[in-house]
Image (cartoon, grey):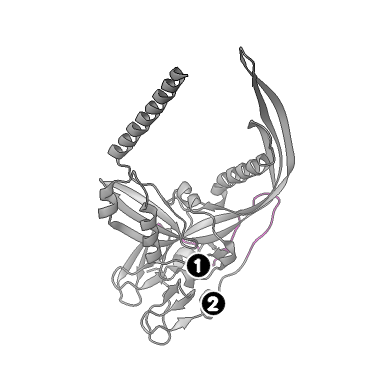
């Protein structure tokens, strides 16, 4: 059996977990609270290692002492003796028999220990309230979905992220236009002037996030950004107790392409914001060069909520730090077509009224 780490209360022996309301470890049995500093001895065997390069340094994080093997992990709960089965990327979960939160230490060995973790600020009740607010004022939402919606699953997950830092030097050329219109008694004239606009400069990026879990859709994870990195702390396994946690299965090298896309798009947008006074502005050519690129490994808090409607699964996500909530919703097609019909009828009536007024004058 693989190694399993549980955090036990020294006062009563109960399993303790991280409490979002007080940002400390707390025993649910005797209510004893523990500062995170007091639990650092669980992680004192971790060693730091890192180097900077002029290109992307994907040797992020710190190495452990053993290599992880296999894809399925079997554990024995130290509280009740039940067997816990996890996949190769499950780093924290709870015992299905007694409910005690556990951290699967072997899942964090052999590769990289995270550099940082942003602890959960919001609990499960906040996630449920977030869904209720998300459903408000959605006119096209089927009434039965809102009235009878039952959540299949609500889970707090620490999602692995690669955080990329880089300096970008860029040259960007835009094709811009200015339009001038005038008229006389016979014609309406339009003059379009074309311009080539050039921008060059440098910009720095810090902690551009790319999610390192293939289970999490990139668009869903990016939609709940941003995170406030001021709340990030040095990683301790104690923060994982009471939550699910995944180890990355998309490594830093595989994440570089997405990081480059985000850096390039952000650079072009920042430079584009300085091109003003034109009717249209389009990018003609763009050259973005990166230097001092490096990556760090972090775990970010995410609430995932799943529900089923008409045999179709709907997934919602909430930022476990800020409460930002996203997720697609089903649409009532009858309401949609009724709305389109009313809009069409309204536009038709407006056109008729305008034509009628023209005839009068």
Identity of the residue drawn at 58% across and 45% down: 262
Above or below — where is 77 with respect to 260?
A: below
Q: Secondary structure at mark 1?
A: loop
Residue 74 is covered by the magenta coloring: no
Q: Secondary structure at mark 2?
A: helix
Q: Position of residue 14 (x, y in %)?
A: 37, 81
Residue 57 is covered by the magenta coloring: yes
Above or below — where is 190 with respect to 310?
A: above
Q: Nearer the viewer, residue 190 or 30?
A: 190
Taking the image as drawn, is residue 232 in sight?
Answer: no
Q: Nearer the viewer, residue 12 or 270?
A: 270
Q: Is residue 156 left or right of residue 42?
A: left
Q: Which class describes the residues within 10 Å of circle 2: few (<14), some (14-19), or many (20+)?
A: some
Q: Position of residue 247 (x, y in %)?
A: 47, 59
Q: How far apart are the alpha carbons under marks 1 and 2?
A: 15 Å
Above or below — where is 137 with respect to 180?
A: below
Q: Is residue 288 left or right of residue 152?
A: right
Q: Position of residue 251 (x, y in %)?
A: 53, 52
Identity of the residue drawn at 29% across and 46% down: 142
From which residue to which does the magenta span run?
A: 49-71
- Provide the residue designation for mark 1: 119
Q: Is residue 290 left or right of residue 21?
A: right
Indicate the quadrant where residue 100 lies.
bottom left
First-in-chain label (1 vs 2): 2
- Provide the residue designation for mark 2: 40
């Amino acid at each position: 059996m693989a190694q399993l780490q549980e955090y036990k209360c020294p006062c009563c022996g109960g399993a303790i977990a991280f409490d979002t309301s007080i940002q400390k470890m707390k025993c649910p049995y005797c209510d004893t609270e523990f500062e995170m500093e007091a639990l650092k001895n669980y992680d004192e065997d971790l060693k730091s290692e890192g180097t900077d390069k002029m290109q992307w340094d994907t040797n992020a994080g710190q190495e452990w002492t053993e290599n992880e093997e296999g894809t399925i992990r079997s554990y024995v709960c130290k509280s009740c003796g039940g067997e816990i089965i996890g996949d190769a990327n499950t780093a924290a979960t709870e015992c299905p028999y007694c409910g005690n939160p556990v951290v699967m230490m072997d899942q964090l060995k052999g590769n990289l220990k995270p550099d940082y973790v942003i602890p959960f600020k919001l609990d499960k009740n906040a996630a449920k309230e977030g869904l209720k607010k998300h459903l408000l004022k959605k006119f096209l939402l089927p009434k039965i979905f809102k009235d009878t919606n039952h959540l299949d699953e609500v889970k707090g997950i620490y999602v692995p992220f690669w955080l990329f830092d880089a300096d970008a030097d860029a040259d960007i050329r835009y094709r811009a236009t200015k339009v001038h219109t005038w008229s006389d008694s016979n014609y309406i004239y339009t003059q379009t002037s074309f311009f080539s606009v050039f921008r060059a400069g440098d910009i720095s990026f810090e902690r551009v996030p790319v999610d390192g879990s293939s289970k999490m859709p990139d668009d869903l994870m990016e939609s709940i950004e941003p995170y406030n990195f001021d709340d990030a702390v040095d990683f301790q396994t104690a923060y994982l107790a009471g939550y699910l946690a995944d180890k990355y299965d998309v490594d830093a090298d595989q994440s570089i392409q997405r990081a480059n896309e985000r850096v390039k798009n952000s650079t072009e947008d920042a430079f584009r914001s300085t091109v003003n006074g034109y009717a249209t502005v389009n990018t003609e050519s763009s050259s973005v060069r990166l230097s001092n690129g490096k990556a760090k490994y972090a775990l970010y808090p995410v609430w995932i909520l799943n529900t089923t409607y008409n045999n179709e699964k709907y997934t919602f996500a909430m930022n476990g730090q800020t409460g930002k909530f996203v997720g697609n919703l089903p649409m009532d097609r009858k309401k949609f077509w009724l709305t389109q019909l009313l809009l069409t009828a309204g536009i038709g009536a407006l056109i008729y009224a305008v034509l009628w007024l023209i005839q009068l004058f």
